[in-house]
Image: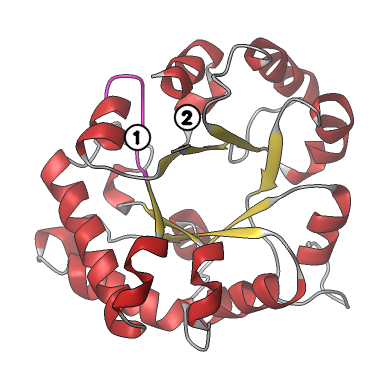
Amino acid sequence: MKKLIIANWKCNPEKIIEGMKILNSLKGLVDGKNKVVICPPSVFLGQFLADFGQDFTFGVQNCYFEQKGAYTGEISPKMIQSIGAKYVIIGHSERRSIFKENDDEINKKLSLILNETNLIPVLCIGENREEREAEKTYQVIARQLMNCLDNIPKEKLNKIVIAYEPVWAIGTGIYATEDKIIDARNSIVKILCDIYDKSIENKINIIYGGSVNKENIDMVINGCKMDGVLVGGASLKPKDFILICNI
């Protein structure tokens, strides 16, 4: 079964030529047995699709919850689809914490994506350090899933990728241990079965993000049985990302 490996470049690199160098370094060296998605800054996407559209699948890091209108600076799902991208990340913890996005806004984005495009949404959920230390992980991800999936029908759940990203592990170099990842995965499955029913148990796509690197990728995929990974900083280092994909 193919694993999903999503590269989230965030607000990097500074110049498009640097991004093209990264993609050229990856070209032909990433194991084709897996599904690899590159999510660069949106301003680079047109050129990347023109030059590397035959080599990679591309996605974007965010979208708005309206398709058009007087929303300066925003990008709609249909715009993303029209340029040729296939995936869109929503609800990333940096969007939640820095830009104050809430579950209601994320739910609107998810509904719009699923109802009006063929894009695959990657819904990020996860607890922060204080919530983890207070043993509130289950309550946090339950609240996020219930709110973000409000009015999303069961039939569309298999089109969504759930990305479990403990906030305390993102960009810190501290990744969740095997037992914590397994616990979170089991909790997500249970919560979704409670929201819908047990018939969806084998239709859920769950990936892990949070300081994923070449040292822990085997544990995350094979030890924790995750369906893939969302890779941040390591995806900007071609040698490391190639290893992650090929392992």
Asked whether 69 or 81 is in front, the reply is 81
Picture quadrant of residue 218: top left
Residue 146 sits above or below residue 49 on the image = below
Residue 128 sits above or below residue 54 on the image = below
Write down the region rendered in magenta: 208-216
- Residue bearing the label numbered 1: 211
Task: Give the residue displayed 16% in from the left and 40% down from the top.
Answer: 178
Picture quadrant of residue 187: bottom left
Question: Can the viewer see residue 74 in this picture?
Answer: no
Q: CA distance from mark 2 to mark 1?
A: 8 Å
How far across and down, in percent of the image, does residue 152 sit?
A: 53, 82
- Amino acid identity at mark 2: Gly
Q: Looking at this rendering, what residue extends furthest in the bottom direction?
A: 151
Quadrant of the image for the C terminus? top left
How far across and down, in percent of the image, does residue 34 sit?
A: 52, 31
Task: Give the residue displayed 87% in from the left and 49% down from the top.
Answer: 83
Relative to residue 106, is residue 46 drawn left or right?
Answer: right
Quadrant of the image for the N terminus? top left
Question: Can the viewer see residue 132 in this picture?
Answer: yes
Q: Are marks 2 and 1 in contact (CB under 8 Å)?
A: yes
- Amino acid identity at mark 1: Ser
Q: Is-magenta flag for residue 106? A: no
Asked whether 35 or 131 is in front, the reply is 35
Task: Give the residue displayed 61% in from the left and 37% down from the top.
Answer: 37
Residue 134 sits above or below residue 55 on the image = below
Picture quadrant of residue 136: bottom left
Give the mark count.
Answer: 2
N-terminal-most mark, 2 or 1: 1
- Residue bearing the label numbered 2: 233
Task: Give the residue displayed 78% in from the left and 61% down from the top.
Answer: 75
